Image (cartoon, rainbow, N blue to C red):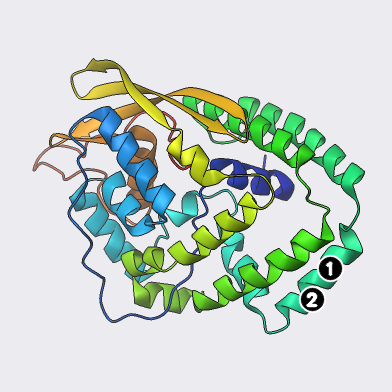
Amino acid sequence: MPMPPTLRSLLAAAALAGLLAACRPAPTEPQGPARSDLSRPALAVQALTGHMRSGDYAAFARDAVPPELHARLQAAWRAGDTRWPLDELPFSERLPEVLGALAAPDAETALAAGFDRQFAGATREIRAAAATLGLFGVQYVEHQGDFSDAERDHYAQLVAAMAQWAAQAPLADGERAHAAIPRLAAAARAVGPTTAEGIAEAGMDASLARIGAFANEAKAVLAGYGLDLDATFDSVEAGLQVQQGDRATVRLRYTLAGAAIDTVVDMERIDGQWYLADYLRHAREAAAAIGEPVEPAVPGEPAAPEAGPPAGPVAAP
């Protein structure tokens, strides 16, 4: 069953993954800083959270998977075969459309007029819609969709928290909207073209690096509506729960829009470094989809199976 568009948007906001794809052509992939300390499970979670907090999505992609897999995904990005990690977003296929609408020459006028026509003053209707979407969204992630058990637990909490915030936020306030639209439009224009050719030419790291300013501007706009995502990132607490060999679970706790989120995420160790198993699974699926081996193959042996299905929380925060 396909996910309804409205729920896709809610899940995307709940995931706080603000990874909006945009880039300008660049001749080479930038050389990023040294990899973070991923020597312990909780440190790996904290590293990814820090990258999301700062808007450094190139560093996020670098630390989310082992170097060999990251290199293969970079090559696949340039070939146009994948947009990982952007394609993990619930509404990733609409990202160029969203940025295009914001970056259009008449965006400020057209979007402001659209808001006034559809949403201005509609506080009761928006709050009712938020409550309905919250109930439906929780039911959806608990029983449908391609989620692991841990993802279902985490995302259900996120959707409920976001719905509660939306039901109280001044989303129908015309003054706020008319101030926010020009800010988002300017930020969208600054990130440049979002064509498939432009994204491929810039490469994965450059493309992800160019979205930081837009993501940070979007966070600042949301703060004006009472959703302080920086405070959410700052509230993250990650602690090792169980470790058995190269597998571990980390308890992740943080506050989102006044709601306490408490979930457990699975981790996997590769070459002494820890990674969120859900991100590994998604990246391996992307590599497999382009005909790459899931793990380096040993002559005479099949490729190693992909990781089991746990949840990847740090996209939210």
Identify the residue shown where x is 70% and y is 27%: 139
Quarter-of-image position of residue 278: top left
What amino acid is labelled 2 in the image?
Answer: Ala
Residue 114 badge: 1
Residue 201 badge: none
* 267 over 24 or under it: above or below: above
The residues tagged by marks 1 and 2 sit, at their Cα atoms, a distance apart of 6 Å
Between 223 and 9, the residue placed more toward the observer is 223
Label 1 sits on a secondary structure element that is helix
What amino acid is labelled 1 in the image?
Answer: Gly
User: Is 111 positioned to the left or the right of 12 in the image?
Assistant: right
Residue where numbered disc 2 is placed: 110
Between 179 and 2, the residue placed more toward the observer is 179
| Residue 202 shows in this picture | yes
Identify the residue shown where x is 52% and y is 54%: 18
Image position, residue 146 (x, y; %): 54, 36
Q: Are marks 1 and 2 in contact (CB under 8 Å)?
A: yes
User: Is 10 positioned to the left or the right of 301 in the image?
Assistant: right
* 206 over 161 or under it: above or below: below
Image position, residue 195 (x, y; %): 51, 76
Q: Please give the count of numbered marks on the rendered protein.
A: 2
